[in-house]
Image (cartoon, helix red, strand yellow):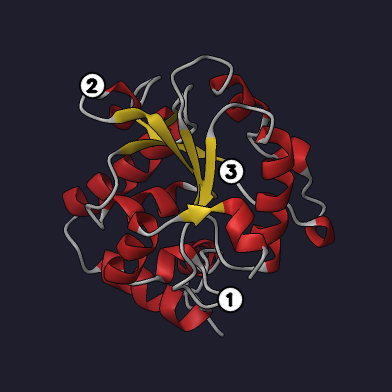
Amino acid sequence: MNFSSKLLENAVAEFAKLPGVGQKTALRLVLHLLNQDKPDVERFSHAISKLRNEIQFCRVCHNISDLQVCEICASPKRDHSLICVVEDTRDVMAIQNTDQYNGVYHVLGGLISPMDGIGPSDLQVDTLVERLKGNDVKEVIFALSATMEGDTTIFYLHKKLKDFNINISTIARGIAFGGELEYVDEVTLGRSIVTRVPYENSLSK
């Protein structure tokens, strides 16, 4: 692609680094910004910069937060005896949108994937174990994507947590194998949370 401006070329190259954005889409976005008023573009730029510099991760559940402890973990209205284990923030948002879950979360920050060089030590596993050492937690729900990596992670976590005096369950598999949790419709995802099953039961199917 030939550019009449190096500034334009550089901006397109940066936008093209975003997932799912090719050069043509990147060019369209950059040209759109050029057609906006300068204050609008400055607000856009400031929001991105502020996000990157000031965003925090909840010290309890590792969800993205504006504060050291996120609103969900800090809420007295949530059921803190129930922890839903998810891969990342997108899954927290997906489950929250179902309005079917009132517990708290634990964000692993990924899934075990030997092919990608991601092992248990790369995930927030130790902090999950620490959260269970008190007497407050009664149930842990595994809400991970129905993929090989998701199943591997659940199997590993179950071995780590099975000696705790808690219920360990997994979301019902109304979700097709290979399905990413964030793309499942809200009704199906909500039903899978409500009709969760003990993890041991899921192994026999």
Q: Residue at x 25, y 24 (%)?
A: 75
Which residue type does callout 3 highlight? Answer: Gly
Q: Which mark is residue 177?
A: 1
Disc 2 crowd, CA 10 A, few/some/many (<14, 14-19, 20+): few
Residue 1 lies, with reference to residue 40, above or below; the image says: below
Dot 2: element: loop
Residue 26: where, in percent of width, then height? 44, 73
Q: Are marks 1 and 3 in contact (CB under 8 Å)?
A: no
**Inter-mark Cα distance, 2 to 1:** 36 Å
Q: Residue at x 33, y 73 (%)?
A: 31
Which residue type does callout 1 highlight? Answer: Phe
Q: Earlier in the sequence, mark 2 or mark 1?
A: 2
Residue 2: where, in percent of width, then height? 55, 84
**Inter-mark Cα distance, 3 to 2:** 25 Å
**Inter-mark Cα distance, 1 to 3:** 21 Å
Question: In this figure, what is the number of numbered marks?
Answer: 3
Disc 1 crowd, CA 10 A, few/some/many (<14, 14-19, 20+): few
Q: Which residue is mark 2?
A: 76
Which residue type does callout 2 highlight? Answer: Pro
Residue 29: where, in percent of width, then height? 35, 71
Who is closer to the viewer here, 33 or 186? Answer: 186
Q: Which mark is residue 95?
A: none
Q: Earlier in the sequence, mark 3 or mark 2?
A: 2
| Quadrant where the C terminus is found in the figure | bottom right
Q: Which residue is mark 3?
A: 109
Who is closer to the viewer here, 18 or 204? Answer: 204
Apparent side of residue 124 relative to residue 27 in the rendered image (left or right): right
